[in-house]
Image (cartoon, rainbow, N blue to C red):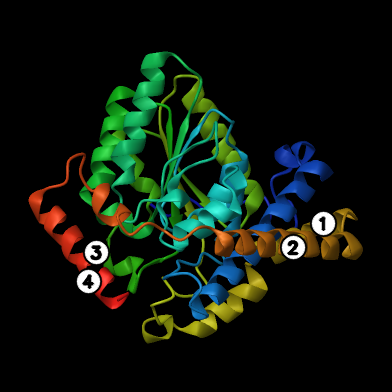
Amino acid sequence: MEFQFPIMQIMNEQGCIVRSEYREQMTKELVMTMYRHLIRTRTFDRKCVSLQRQGRIGTYVPYEGQEACQVGSALALCDGDWMFPTYRDHGAMMTFGCSLMQILLYWKGRTEGCVPPAGKKIVPPSVPIATQLPHAAGAAYAEKRKGTKNAVIVYFGDGATSEGDFHEGLNFASVFNVPVVFFNQNNQYAISVPITRQMKSKTIAQKALAYDIPGIRIDGNDIFAVYFETQQALERARNGRGPTLIEAVTWRYGAHTTSDDPSKYRDQEESKRRRETTDPIKRMERFMQREGWWDEKWANQVQEEVSMEIEQAVAEMERYPKANPADMFDYVFAQPTWTITEQKNAYFQWKRGIEG
């Protein structure tokens, strides 16, 4: 199956283009836009890890190493498309237009962080594994029934392919030929479990055969492969040719979450090696240098601008009004049950007691 589903690559680790048919579409403007988003997402991720360590946000889910997957796929979307992210896809969310402050509020535990910008169809991040796949298929079916050209992208990790929702989502999408792209980021570990312990199949892309839909395996650290293959899959979806399963093979450098210790189950030397060889940002820099487009002054300016943007978003997040504790109780059901009412009363009675 690895021969039937080879890893498709456009730009290799040295920054060389190995698929010349895409070369004309790689304009300097597109490349500079991609690079800015890559730097923006990585800088934001590192800042969030720092904020968590300082106790300024809650448990955080880092994605460093997977930036090309998220930036490349999100840039392929059109404004009217849907995005169904997981808890690790805030890089895709911010690329698609979600504000940094809203994402920070989400990690602060605020309901306001789940509200997308006006005009953007970004569903709140799904924490339960794979539950968003049937939802995405349903949203795509709705767009098909409405007769629009809007498509849907749904993100998930390799561990999600072990869940029943994976089968249900792909099966429904296949049967009803709906416009959805199932975008798998195979970072090769579902929390602490390597992919070899989750499945016997050699690839995730081959699972598409069971649903009679296209299955594509790409280098997830090659932003060009991600962007162009996702773009083509979305176009197939818009034109009534149904769903696609994309397996983007990548690597997560750090922990599953900030409460995890990856050294317990993974050789950290592998991450160090990959930072020098397959890193998506270094690869893009090598390509830009080869093209004569690399400008150190401009790159430093990009870093300064995104760092300033992130610091401003952090300041906004920390100035945000305190949460109303009643929200924990009032929005669980349309009409609170007697148990929730009892809990709410007990909480506020305790609160009045400690406040004197």
Marked residue nearer the N-terminal end (4 or 2): 2
Task: Locate the C terminus and report the quarter of the image it occupies.
Answer: bottom left
Is disc 1 placed on a helix, strand or loop?
A: helix
User: Can residue 341 be seen at all in this image of the molecule?
Assistant: yes
Marked residue nearer the N-terminal end (2 or 1): 1
The spot of residue 155 in percent (x, y) is 43, 48
How far apart marks 2 and 1 lie (CA) works out to 24 Å
How far apart marks 4 and 2 lie (CA) works out to 42 Å
Please tell me the numbered disc located at residue 350.
4
Disc nearest the viewer among 4 and 1: 4
- Give, as a three-letter code, the residue at label 4: Trp
Please tell me the numbered disc located at residue 348.
3
Q: What residue sits 88% from the left and 59% below the top?
A: 298
Residue 341 drawn above or below residue 107? above
Q: Are marks 4 and 3 in contact (CB under 8 Å)?
A: yes
How far apart marks 4 and 3 lie (CA) works out to 5 Å
The spot of residue 274 in percent (x, y) is 59, 73
The spot of residue 84 in percent (x, y) is 42, 43
Q: Mark 1 points at which residue?
A: 288
Disc nearest the viewer among 2 and 1: 2
Disc 2 crowd rating (10 Å Cα; few below 14, some 14-19, many 20+) is few
Disc 4 crowd rating (10 Å Cα; few below 14, some 14-19, many 20+) is few
Quadrant assignment, res 344: bottom left
